[in-house]
Amino acid sequence: MMGLQVPCASSSSGRHLGSWHALAPKQQQHVRAASHHHHVHLPPLFPPSHLHALPTTSPVSTAAAKAPRAGGSGSGGSKRTKRGFARSSNQLAKKEQRRGQDQLVQEIDEEQQGDGPGVDAIQMRSEYQVYKDAEYKPQRWIGPVDIQNIPGKGRGLVVTQQVVPGDLLMVLPALAFLEGELGEVPEPEELHVAMLEDGLTPAQRRVLDMLYDGSEASLSAPASMTTLDHRFWSSRGKSDSQAPQISSSRLLSILQNCAVADGLQDGTCMTLRHQKPFGYVGLWPELSLVNHSSSPNISTVVIKDRMLVHAAVEMSPGDELLRSYLGASITQPLPQREAELAEAGWPGLEASTARGALESQVSDNVREVLQGAWQWFSQEANPRFSQANAAETLGPLKELLEEAEQIVSEVEEAVEAEPGLSDLQRIMLRASAYDSYDMLVVTDEFVNQERANPGHLLYCLELLRVLAPGSESHTSVALKYDSIMRDRLLMAESLFKKSQSPSKRKQAATIMKTCAKEAELAGSYCLDAYISRYGWVSVDMFETLRQGTEVHTEALEQMSIMEAQGLSETTKDFSINGVNVSVVDKVDLGGANAVPSGLSSSQATSSGSNDSRASIQVVEAPSSSTNAVRAEKGGWEPEMVEAEVQDMPDNINSDAA
């Protein structure tokens, strides 16, 4: 059972869990929008009690767990292993800065090339060609997934064998699909009209008859993974007289309960395919059987009318596939989540989930603290942030930063004091205060700029691994954190080279060693995020996807800046990491509530209508790694690092050295 899902639905704050972190601290960027929602069971990134300290030990990476060791640092290995990922000096400023991540990806690459064990298990699937080839359409494919009656829920999907994060579960063509404009979320009523105009084929009617239409009878309608494929019925032709008739009202009810909509398709892949990531509404019959959880365990990627579904958590045979029916309230406490689902026609549904049950059973103090954090954010912090941002003054933001630190500390204290909870359960509770953690990151970046504490961003990344693993939010935050830690390593290396006295050189060496460990961790988190979203891709594809994310994010930022400058119709050429990109921006800026071009209405700070006709065109495809420009992108300037060497340990846990 399910309702119409808008994975990027707007919140009262209008924030996207990842887009802000990917764009801040650029003060021209005024975008804050809502999230996709998936879940993965991974160990905490770092001990919960150390909010201001970066991790000093590495958790077990899902990538490392799946890819058997074929040699590495200090091991014999193959020549390929010892060479690592380094290509040329002009592509990588320092091989050391990516040692940890390179080794993980390299091991996957070796298996795909047959250089190591497990090649059959990890060879990149042909379906992933869809990520960058606009002419390629993968066929429907169903992996280790089957339909099963779930006690108390009705039909659901379960896995039939052991799977790990990144395993491809399904490739699904839409039974019906309708694109909107860039940033526009089409309504199910629009798809309803389009389907009636085209006429329902007998094969479509056969499949529609097995989907949930709001009635109890439809919950037990017989279905199998085979019969949900309209091609199974197509052999009967248009003369299939036994195909059930679907009335207009029933069709609309099916779409309202089962369709999926969003303001953007996958931005990374659509950029690589040189296509616009239009909004869409679609009906994928198999996905409609996935039941609800506020801590989901699958991720989805939509590219045109194709949806790829991956595991986002390790699952055993019989485990149920779960996804979120929530929109904005996924980051909010239990009462807000229950209210959203009740309004959508699912009263009491949230209380039956693992996260909902946990939150209902903890002490009154924890629930009061979580509710207080939400009220502070929604009623005080977010309105004041918008006012300060519009006025371009830092004074109020400094006050908000202090308040955010206090609110987060209260949440931490309450959650840590609750007895008998696992690390994952504590993270699930913190997730209900995500907006306060996010406000801490945003205000810290505005107020402190390059001196902002990356530990705050890392904490948000930890929460996203519960709220939205494998989402665009997850990959964009992970990529930003990875970039920050690489920049810090480069700056630390520069400082080490410039140090003259033995004491300063020793201190710089300690900092550099710590930065190297942190960069290695950041790389593994980034790899985890991309694997959870895009599966076990090749090394080259992984690098291409990273570039696509960077180009897409930077293009959206450039378009937002253009709008802030009042450019109502402009073609602007610029370069992103050496890639020539042309942005054609045609936006109605007649009102104060105009929506940033290239972004959905759910990603805007206002509630104005979107008349965007913006396009992102990659004029010259990437031909080399983006790593060569890392030293030129953000981070500390070498002069500042050298001048402030005494301050660096405040932001870096040098005890790890």
Image (cartoon, rainbow, N blue to C red):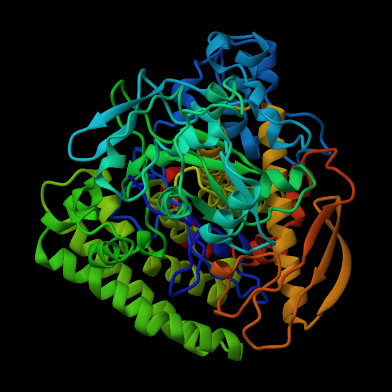
Question: What is the quadrant of residue 102 in the picture?
Answer: top right
- Quarter of the figure that contains the N terminus: top left
> Which residue is painted at 85% across and 43% down in the image?
621
> Which residue is painted at 75% across and 43% down in the image?
272
Q: Position of residue 25 (x, y in %)?
A: 61, 69
Q: How many marks?
A: 0
Question: What is the quadrant of residue 459 in the picture?
Answer: bottom left
Residue closer to the observer: 218 or 394: 218
> Which residue is painted at 48% across and 88% down in the image?
396
Q: Position of residue 603 (x, y in %)?
A: 57, 67
Question: What is the quadrant of residue 65 in the picture?
Answer: top left
186 relative to 299 in the view: left or right: right
Is residue 622 something that shows in the picture? yes
Is the residue 515 above or below the residue 338 in the image? Answer: above
Residue closer to the observer: 70 or 76: 70
Residue closer to the observer: 85 or 321: 321
Is the residue 654 above or below the residue 91 in the image? Answer: below
185 relative to 255 in the view: left or right: right
Q: Position of residue 85 (x, y in %)?
A: 70, 27
Residue closer to the observer: 548 or 10: 10
Is the residue 589 above or below the residue 136 in the image? Answer: below
Q: Position of residue 357 (x, y in %)?
A: 17, 51
Is residue 483 something that shows in the picture? no
